[in-house]
């Protein structure tokens, strides 16, 4: 089976994990601090690690004092985690339509959905493709709202000349098993805002004030002070050890993702009657996933099943958030999502693939589409 995505590990990750196991200290300690320092050098900004990208978003929102009665603007096309992080604070995720060209949040729709209750916007750099940050920050400044970038897909991507995470208000990354770098499970919050950093560093450890510093040194607070709701969201040294090895390999991992995506673009654009390519600049972005639009596709589910029979796993990113009961909203508010979402297929992409695999994948998809039953 050619897998849609996978963790791509080397001897370095294995050695690092062994080193931690031998210490018999598996909690949050010096290894997490080292990973944070290395990430700080990467982003040129302070970084706090947590146990998932969802936790990073939840804590960032909480640190911005977002609560019940507030509203947060978010694209309708994103992973469920983005919505759930918002609703975990008691606030309402207000879903917005997406741009047809890149599937990122439509600013026009965000403007329409803005109300007095809107406290933040979460642009999602879908696939690793950066949102139009100049326009988003201009809007946020005018409306005096926070910007929490969901950069789960965009580790290593650039907006113009600046690395995602090195600019802006607050950035949240995910290091789950299939991301551009993985720590097994994990995530981080990146910001320059000292108040946010203090809040997140406490709230990831049950809100215990100053607990992070103690943990870095293998210590803990026995008599503690807590002023806010906290969570058990800290990262473990095991996960940090995996993350550090991945970060040291990032140049090579990201290069491979770029080469493969460029190759997809090349072979798919030769078949422009069947496929519509989403224009991306792989000199600036590190693709987390590779999506393509199959023109006039009506039976996407059947196509995915047929490819599985041929040992190719496809993805369908993402099921629109307004279709699930918990967040139900009429589809008439999302003309662009409705036009496009069920024509998008995600092709296998991870650094252990090679261009020959891609030739085979596209050949099999084209052969399957020849059957015409999907249109
Ligand atoms: C766009 C997006 N946001 C948030 C998350 C949540 O990250 P995690 O799985 O690490 O909780 C993901 C994970 O897949 C994601 O794709």
Image (spheres, grey):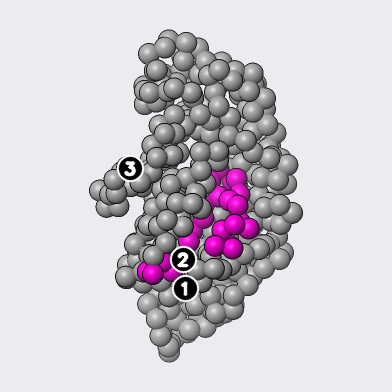
Residue at 62% from the left image edge and 30% from the top image edge: 353
Q: How crowded is the residue under tag 2: few (<14 C-alpha within 10 Å), some, or many (20+)?
A: many
Identify the residue position indicated by label 2 in the image. Answer: 120
Q: Is residue 126 above or below residue 298?
A: below
Mark 3 touches mark 2? (CB < 8 Å): no
Q: Are marks 1 and 2 in contact (CB under 8 Å)?
A: yes
Of 99 and 237, the residue lying toward us? 99
Read off the residue under disc 3.
332
Viewer-nearest of discs 1 and 3:
3
Residue 228 appears in view: yes
Q: CA distance from mark 3 to mark 2?
A: 24 Å
Residue 26 — which label? Answer: none
Image point 41% across, 85% down: which residue? 226
132 lies above or below 266: below
Q: Position of residue 230 (x, y in %)?
A: 40, 75
Image quadrant containing the C terminus: top left
Residue 139: percent from left, percent from top = 54, 62
How far apart are labels 1 and 3 at the CA level? 31 Å
Q: Earlier in the sequence, mark 1 or mark 3?
A: 1
Residue at left 35%, top 66%?
Answer: 91
The answer to whether residue 215 shows anywhere in this view is no
Label 3 beta carbon less than 8 Å to ligand 1 = no
Q: Position of residue 149 (x, y in %)?
A: 54, 59
Residue at the (53%, 34%) spot, across then down: 291
Residue 206 versus residue 280: which sits nearer the camera? 280
Cα separation between marks 1 and 2: 9 Å
355 is higher (above) or lower (below) than 43: above
Disc assigned to residue 64: 1
Range drawn in magenta: 116-139
- The secondary element bearing badge 1 is classed as loop
């Amino acid at each position: 089976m050619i897998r849609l995505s996978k963790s791509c590990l080397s001897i370095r990750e294995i050695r690092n994990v062994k080193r931690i196991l031998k210490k018999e200290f598996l909690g949050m300690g010096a290894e997490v601090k080292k990973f944070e320092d290395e990430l700080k050098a990467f982003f040129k900004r302070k970084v706090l690690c947590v146990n998932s990208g969802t936790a990073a978003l939840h804590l960032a929102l909480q640190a911005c004092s977002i609560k019940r009665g507030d509203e947060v603007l978010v694209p309708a096309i994103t992973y469920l985690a983005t919505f759930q992080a918002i609703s975990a604070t008691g606030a309402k995720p207000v879903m917005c339509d997406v741009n047809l060209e890149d599937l990122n949040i439509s600013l026009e729709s965000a403007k329409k959905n803005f109300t007095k209750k809107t406290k933040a916007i979460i642009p999602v750099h879908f696939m690793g493709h950066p949102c139009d940050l100049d326009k988003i920050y201009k809007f946020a400044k005018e409306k005096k709202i926070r910007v929490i970038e969901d950069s789960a897909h965009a580790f290593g991507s650039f907006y113009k000349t600046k690395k995602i995470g090195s600019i802006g208000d607050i950035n949240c990354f995910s290091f789950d098993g299939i991301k551009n770098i993985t720590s097994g499970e994990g995530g981080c919050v990146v910001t320059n805002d000292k108040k946010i950093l203090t809040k997140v560093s406490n709230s990831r450890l049950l809100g215990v004030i100053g607990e992070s510093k103690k943990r870095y040194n293998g210590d803990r607070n026995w008599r503690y002070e807590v002023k806010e709701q906290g969570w058990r969201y800290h990262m473990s040294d095991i996960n940090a050890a995996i993350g550090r090895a991945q970060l040291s390999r990032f140049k090579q991992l990201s290069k491979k993702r770029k080469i493969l995506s460029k190759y997809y673009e090349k072979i798919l654009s030769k078949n422009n009657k069947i496929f519509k390519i989403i224009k991306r600049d792989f000199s600036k972005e590190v693709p987390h996933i590779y999506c393509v639009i199959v023109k006039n596709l009506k039976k996407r589910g059947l196509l995915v099943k047929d490819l599985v029979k041929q040992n190719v796993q496809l993805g369908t990113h993402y099921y629109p958030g307004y279709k699930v009961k918990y967040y139900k909203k009429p589809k008439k508010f999302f003309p662009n999502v409705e036009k496009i979402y069920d024509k998008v297929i995600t092709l296998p992409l991870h650094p252990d693939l090679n261009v020959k695999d891609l030739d085979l994948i596209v050949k099999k998809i084209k052969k399957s589409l020849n059957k015409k039953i999907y249109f």
